[in-house]
Amino acid sequence: MIQLDDPATFKEKDPTQFAQGIKDFPDQLSVAWLSMSEFALPAHYLKSQHTVILAPPYHAFAAETVETLSFLSGAVPVIFAGEALPAFVSTQSLVCALDYTGKSSELLRSFERAHQRGARLVAASSGGGLAALTRKYRVPHYAIHYGASPWTVNGYATLALLGVLARLSFLELRSWDTLPQAFESIPAFTAQLDPHVPVDENRAKRLAEAWANTLPVILVSETLTSVGVDWQRSLGAIAHTEVLVDALETVAHTEFIQTLKNTGVRHVMCIASEQEAQSVREVRRLLETNEIGVSELALKPDTAQLGVLLAGHIQGLYTSYYLSILGGKDPALVGSRSQG
């Protein structure tokens, strides 16, 4: 049986040190914040009427986080379009392309089409064809200087997108200078989930063990639906497992609990804000009465929600990582198969 508290397990199952990228997430935020503080954009970009983000699945967290924050406090609409260029993109559009590898063929084609339509362009990557196109078109490019799986560089990706929109005043932040306050708790939070922290003190390890050889089920409050979707994506790509995500209140339906029991579900993860503790307690009571275990991720409310979303993403990554290890898989190889 694979032991998550045995250092030899990670040496054998994680030869490329995939976990190091997750561990470095807080440092990514700090480095990206500093470098984006000096990132220059052409003045005419201020005339953009909307922003379109192009990004592969492994950067969906970064794109959706910025899209969410823009919905809450944005001056210009932000649309995450995946890798396909929307038909409405024109000379009035700001197109932000994000791809750590810089090699996604569909994204590169979309970036070229955006240029042909006269859109204002900016990109972030570690190099590849995307960096080459920014040089060809003479448009801004943010270089990500880091070697890791694309799934673990969303600290850089998120701050790069936030930086672009903040520099153009398209996103209403209290101040770019004080933005680190939104993620000041992330280093300590990440450290609690590190491989060196034993199972009895590490909630990501405990959850992975509870989900081993069974269907992972996530129940999430309406305000944090994006966190549940992010977990589903990470678990599918890194742990290579199917995941059921549903609304927290679904548990009130007797047939739902019966469906969980009939499919052999043994453990459920509840994701909600600390303000929704009463709802989670009721869900726990109903599930445990039916001999289904429950874990909780109670995220502290944040006025801009950035800290909440970052914390949820990190625990999702670590849980996916540990579940991959328990499944006897190299998480880096599993992730690479999902990068399309």
Image: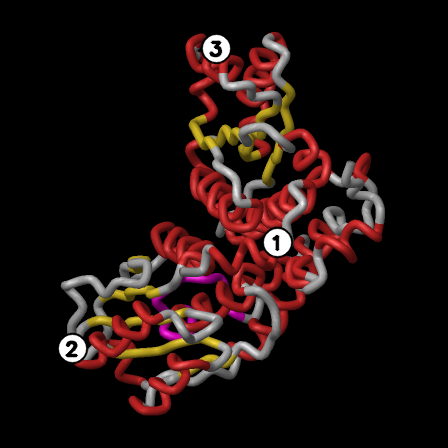
Asked if 323 appears above or below 168 in the picture, the reply is above
Pointer 1 residue? 331
In the image, which disc is placed on residue 222?
Answer: none
Q: Is mark 1 on a helix, strand or loop?
A: helix
Residue at 31 percent across and 74 percent down: it is: 108
Q: What element carries label 2?
A: loop
Asked if 122 appears above or below 203 in the picture, the reply is below
State which quadrant residue 256 falls in: top left
The amino acid at mark 1 is Pro
Callout in the foreground (2, 1)? 1
- Marks 2 and 1, the one that precedes in the sequence: 2
The amino acid at mark 2 is Arg
Number of residue marks: 3
Labels 2 & 1 near each other (Cβ < 8 A): no
In the image, which disc is placed on residue 258?
Answer: 3
Q: What stretch is highlighted in magenta?
A: 166-176
Q: Distance between the residues labelled 2 and 1?
A: 39 Å
- Marks 3 and 1, the one that precedes in the sequence: 3
Callout in the foreground (3, 1)? 1
Tell which of 195 and 42 is nearer to you.
Answer: 195
Pointer 2 residue? 117
Q: What element carries label 3?
A: helix
Task: Judge the density around disc 3: few (<14), some (14-19), many (≥20) Cα neighbours within 10 Å.
Answer: some
- The percent position of residue 284, horizontal first and vertical second, equals 60, 18
Q: Can residue 157 be seen in this view?
A: yes
Would you say 116 lies left or right of 199 here?
left
Residue at 66 percent across and 54 percent down: it is: 186
Q: Is residue 179 visible?
A: no
